[in-house]
Image (spheres, rainbow, N blue to C red):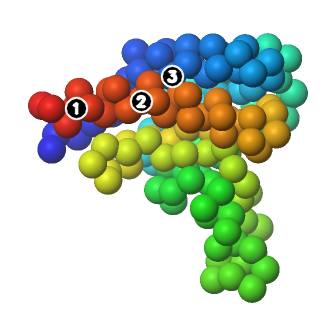
Amino acid sequence: MAKRIVTEEICEQLAMAAKQESRRIGVGVTLSVTDEAGNLLLLQKFGNAILPSLEISAKKAYTAAVLRQPTAEFGQIAQVGQSAFGINVTNDKLVIFGGGFPLQIKGETVGGIGVSGGSVEEDETVAHAVLKVFAKFAEEWQEE
């Protein structure tokens, strides 16, 4: 498979999905999108998202991209008594609660998204709407 990248066009479509879903549920959020190495490609605040959501969403996207797993899953192994307990204090970019998801094509991580501004459940609701849009791009790439 040829190397896939998250383009500006894809970022714009993902942002539109986040904006629409955040309006639908009535919660201001911030969306961050990264490449596979966790480099920030998009950071966009919608509505009355709280100011810390800017940094938190970027860290969620980074964590999901570089660890290639949702931040909530990573958070499970970072709990007291688990194999990665304390890892989040070794790197201030790592987030151990929900709202971050890797962008994957056939198991290959090509980027990450992070949503912050609401409760974890609200952040994940918006993130799932974003992932549905990304899935359309993933399908097109898989057909090539």
Q: Amino acid at mark 2?
A: Phe
**Relative to 74, residue 133 above or below:** above
Q: Amino acid at mark 3?
A: Leu
**Circles 3 and 2: CB atoms closer than 8 Å:** yes
Q: CA distance from mark 1 to mark 2?
A: 11 Å
Which residue in the protein does label 3 denote? Answer: 14
> How would you rate the neighbour count of disc 3 (Cα within 10 Å): few for under 14, some for 14-19, many for 20 or more?
many
**Quarter placement of the C terminus:** top left
* SS at badge 3: helix
**Quarter placement of the N terminus:** top left
Q: In the image, what residue occupies the spot 71% across and 36% down?
A: 123
Q: Which label belongs to residue 141?
A: 1
Q: Amino acid at mark 1?
A: Trp
Kindly tell me whether residue 44 is visible in this rendering: yes
Which residue in the protein does label 2 denote? Answer: 134
* SS at badge 1: helix
Q: Nearer the viewer, residue 44 or 75?
A: 75
Residue 103 in the image, given as x and y percentages of width and height: 43, 41
Image-based side of 36 in relation to 34, left or right: left
Residue 9 in the image, given as x and y percentages of width and height: 40, 15
